[in-house]
Structures are given as structure tokens and as C-alpha cells.
Image: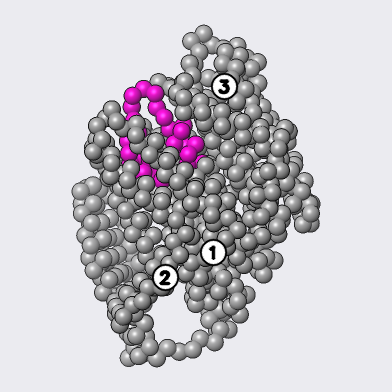
Amino acid sequence: MGTIFFFVLAAVSVISAILIVAQKNAVASALYLIVTLCSQAMLYLLLGASFLAVIQIIVYAGAIMVLFLFVIMLLNLRRDEFGPDKKKIQRVLAFALGAVWLIQVVAVIKLGLSKMSLSPVTPEAALETGSVQTIGKSLFTEYLYPFEITSILLLVAILGSIVLAKKKI
Amino acid sequence: MPITIPPIDFRVIMPEIVITLFACLVMLLEPFLPDRRKWILPHLSSLGVFVAAYFCLPLWNSNLLLWQGQALGDNLAVIFKIIFLLGTLLTILISYLKSGHHWGGEYYSLILFSTLGMMIMASSSDLIVIFLGLEVMSIALYVLAGFNRSDLKSNESAMKYFLMGAFSTGFLLYGIALIYGTTGSTNLNILVNNPHLTEPLFITGLGLILVGLAFKVATVPFHMWVPDVYEGAPTPITAFMAAGPKAAGFAALLRVFLIGLTPLAPMWITILWILAVLTMTLGNVLAIAQMNIKRMLAYSSIAHAGYILISVVAGGDDGLSSSVFYLLVYSLMTIGSFAVIIALGEKGEKNEELPDYRGLGLKYPLLGVCMTIFMVSLSGIPPTAGFVGKFYIFSAAVKNGQLELAIIGVLNSLISVYYYLRVVVIMFMQEAPSPSVVPHSSWSVQLALWLTAMATLGLGIFPDILFKITQQSWLFTLR
């Protein structure tokens, strides 16, 4: 049952990810991004990471995507403003290199995982590590320093966006 | 579930705490100060730099660490922190504007936050912390690059830097994720003992991390952003970018490759060898064609990243200490040359094209002599610090069996002599145009000029003092 769910969700997330970049219309791209993010949240749930799944929906699919759509609609982009890509060779080259990279990564992961002896995780253990309690505890003990740096990072981002966006400094 | 927070030895992260406090203080004071008191802010920022440097000193030879190496207090970290703080102090000095217009508190606050990011980055052996430090540094820099909001070039610079930087951070993060996936840890001290280090998955991750860091230190072929960003950003910020973030990128590179993953050297050494040769050669050859002095110095900074990569490839004690030595010397001479550009760019006229420099050496001898010292030092001619630094790097390379690399490096320095000395020739041997450029005479820019020129000459004549210090950087470094 879990395997079927996994493959369906994986297919949905990959296809919608491709559609994001294939769309000409920016609003449609943003909507497909929501689909990708939601299907990823489901994948997290399958792994037993309930906290991560909820955060993914609330923060990414919810808050950030609303801002995204808001900005796109405010900018009011029309289709012709994108214009055709002038450098065809660049596109071909990018596509070829991307394909090579994809094959390489798939091969490497396939090779790497088959050689390593990964011990399967029991569902109970997965639920344990994915819970809010465990994450909260490790945030304030093991990862205290990175956690505090993250708060400064957010402060810098706020300061920076105000500096760039404010009418008169 | 009760949480017990383990006791923290605050001495290790004291410099970071001080810089954070001062950055917040400057930011919060800004709205409460009337315009005529805004001059307090740069002074307060400089004070913060000095206090942070004061708290760095007790860490020398202390070899303390926190959270299994997430924050390190070893000698290498101390030296790098001093380099960053020096660069920050000089940047604050050359940011002084004479004409009553102030940069505002956000400017100084962002510089301090960027320094904080560099300090975090250079003193950690945990990939997550290195990544977070890099982000704090970069986000502040993206904004600083676009600080001249009415200037289109500054906007272009910020946009380009942001897009490319965010893209390269993606590579870095993907690499860290793959490494975590293979070894189950992001701490270099722990994962170096993992049996899966030769797995293709791990090597791919390592390669991605290399791409991310190579972008930050601007090596070829990840250098495309450098000339445009350096040209468009406000000149003090360009000086800051050439000194601090480059040193921070190299600090992370040294931590990850040279110190953390020494056993894997055969894997990454060939790649770095190729990168070093490409970076030096392309940087120097392209610099010849530049007529804008900021663009020329941008390509020169690419070339210098190549020289420092030689010392990383050479490896061992000598490689590490010579790269630290060179990073310090490079910060001094590059900030010095940007200070000359700032001195000539008063009153809204930029005066960044080479013909603007005609005859200035004879008209303003002190400025001309300073610029000559920096150009001579950048091209690596004695008796300047640039020569000593290059000498140490090349001798480290020869000692560790990288003779070809040393020869390529020497040949490249020969190419670079042409475009560095061209500036001197233009300044001293060409006639000045009739309404010639009038330099800026603010005391802080002058002070920065004097400090950097004296240090460049002084370290060229008496390099022993600094070299003894950098040699000890390896001694107490955590393995």
C-alpha cells in the first residue's frame, strides 16, 4: 500500500515540477509549484515525518506561495514580455548538460545505495524521530548554535529587504 | 521531555556575540539619531570591531571548541577572524563621505552582519554551520552591492550577485545533503572516520560543495559574476567583497578539504590543480583588456584566487600557512588600491576609467606613490608584501612536489606585471588633461591609505613577524 502511494506521489511531484518550468504563464507555474510542494509533504508523511509535512504545507504551500502569486499578479506580466529565447545553442547545451547530470546522479545514487548496507527503519522509530518533541529537543541541544545563527540570518534578511524596498532611507 | 542545555563556554563565540551586539546596536540607534549626529554610527561600528578583536586574542593557543566543533577556537579561526575584522575596519574607514551625505546605519549594520557570517564560517567544522555563516555573509552582501539604489549599475550588480549566489548556494546545500545521506553526519570531525568515504554518492556531494565554494572565492569557471558585480557595487563594498568574503570562502575551503578531508586528498587535488591553472591564466589574460580600473581589479582578484589555490593544492603546513599569509596581504593591498579609487572619485564623478588617471602621480605625489606601492605589490615585485606572499606560496608548492604549478604561477605573475604597471605608467608618464581629477581629502580615507601602504611595505621588508604567527595556525588546528 505504502509503495503504491509512494510511486503515485513521486510521479505527481516530478510531473508537476517539469510543468513548472514548461509553462509560459507565470501564474500557472506557481500553481504547479503548489502541487509539487503538497505532494512532497505527502511523501514526508509516508516517511513518518509528520512535523516536516505540516510545516511544508503551512510555510511553503501556504504562506510563501500566497506571496508568490501576489507578486506575480501585481507585476501583471503578459505572455509576450518573456520573449523568445534568442540563444538557441545555449538552450540546447543547457538541456544536454542537464541530461548528463541527471544520468550521473541517478547512476551514482543507484550505485551508492546498493553498496551501502542501510538498516531499515521501523515505522515506530520513524515516528519517534519525526515528532515535534524530538525535533524541538535537538534544536535546543545538539543544534543550538545553528538555530541561533538562523535567527540572525532572518534578521539580516529583514533588514536587507527594508533597505532595498523602502522609499527613502 | 525535560531539556537540559549543556553548559556553554562563551569564550569561544565571544567575538561573534560582540559583533552581533554592535550590529544590532547600530541598527537600532539609526532612527533615534538626528542627522547631524549620524557620524557616531561608523565610530561605533569601528569600536565593535576593536572589541571583537580584543576577545579573539585570548583564544590564541587555547584550542577550545564548542558543540563537537560547531564553533572552534583554534589558531586558524583566530587568524581568519583578525583578517576579517581588519578588512571590516578598513572598509568602514574608506566608506567616509565628505559631502555631508551619510550611508546610514543600515550600511554599517549590514557590514558588521556580513563580518559575523564570515567569522562563523571560518571557525566551524560543521557543514551546516559553515552553510549558515555563508548565507549570513552573502545576504548582507547582496544588499550592500545594491546600496546605491538610484544607480542602475548598482542594481544590476546586486541582482546578478543575488541570482548567481542563490544558485551556487543550491549546489552547496545539495552537496551537504548528499554527504549527510552517505555518512549520517555533517560534522567533518566525525564523518572523516566513516567507512563510506569512497562511495560515488559521497564524492558527488564533495564535488557539489566544491562548486558552491569555488563560486564564492571566484575561481574560473565560476567567475562570470565577478567583473559586473565589482564594477557596479559601491567602491567601498567592492573593496570589502574582494577582501573579506574571498578570505572566508578560502577559510571554508581549507576547513573542508585541506583539514577535514586530508585522507581524501588524491580525489580533490587534481580538480583543484586544474582550477588553479585556469583561474590564474584566464584572470590575468582578461585583465589586460580592461580599461575600467574596477573591472581590472576584479579580474586581478580572480587571478589572485588562483595563486591561493596553488597553496591549497600544495597542502601540508606550508600550504596552509602560506595561504593564510597571502590572504591577509591580499586584503591589505586590494583595499588600499580601492581606497585610491575612492579618493579620486569624489563629487559624484566616478573617474574609474584608466585615462582619468593620466598625470595624477605627478600632481598628487602621495596618492601616486601609494598606488604604485599597491600595484607593485599586487604584481609581486620586491620589496613589497605581495612578493613575499607569492614567494611563500611558490616555495610551498615546490617543497610539496608541485613544481609545474609553481612555474605556471611565476609565468602568470609575469603577465600580470604588464597591466599593473600600466596604471603606474599612466599616472606618472602621461600628461594630465586640463580639467584634471581632484582627489578627496577626508581623513579616514587618507588614514586607510597610509595604513595599507605602510603595512604592504612593512610586511614586505619584515615578513618574519607575520610569518611566525601564520606558521602556528597549523600547530593547534583541530584535526
Q: Are marks 3 and 2 in contact (CB under 8 Å)?
A: no
Residue at 42 percent across and 44 percent down: it is B48
Quarter where residue A149 is shown:
bottom left
User: In the rendered structure, which disc, 1 or 3, sits on the residue that comes first in sequence?
Assistant: 1
Residue B348 at x, y = what percent?
39, 23
Q: Residue flagged by tag 1: what amino acid is it?
A: Leu
| B166 vs B446, nearest the viewer | B446
Q: Position of residue B126 (x, y in %)?
A: 50, 66
Q: Which disc number belongs to residue B332? A: none
Locate residue A134, reporting x and y percent.
34, 79
Q: Quadrant of the N terminus of chain A?
A: bottom left
Let me know if marks 3 and 2 both belong to one chain. yes
Main secondary-structure element of the magenta-colored stretch: helix
- B78 above or below B377? below
Q: Secondary structure at mark 3?
A: helix
Relative to B262, A53 lies left or right? left
Q: Is residue B48 left or right of residue B282?
A: left
Q: Please provide the residue range marked out in magenta.
A: B87-112
Residue that mark 3 sits on: B367
Read off the residue under disc 1: B64
Mark 2 crowdedness (10 Å alpha carbons): few <14, some 14-19, many ≥20:
few
Q: Which mark is residue B7?
A: 2
Chain assignment, label 3: B
Between the C-alphas of marks 2 and 1, the distance is: 14 Å
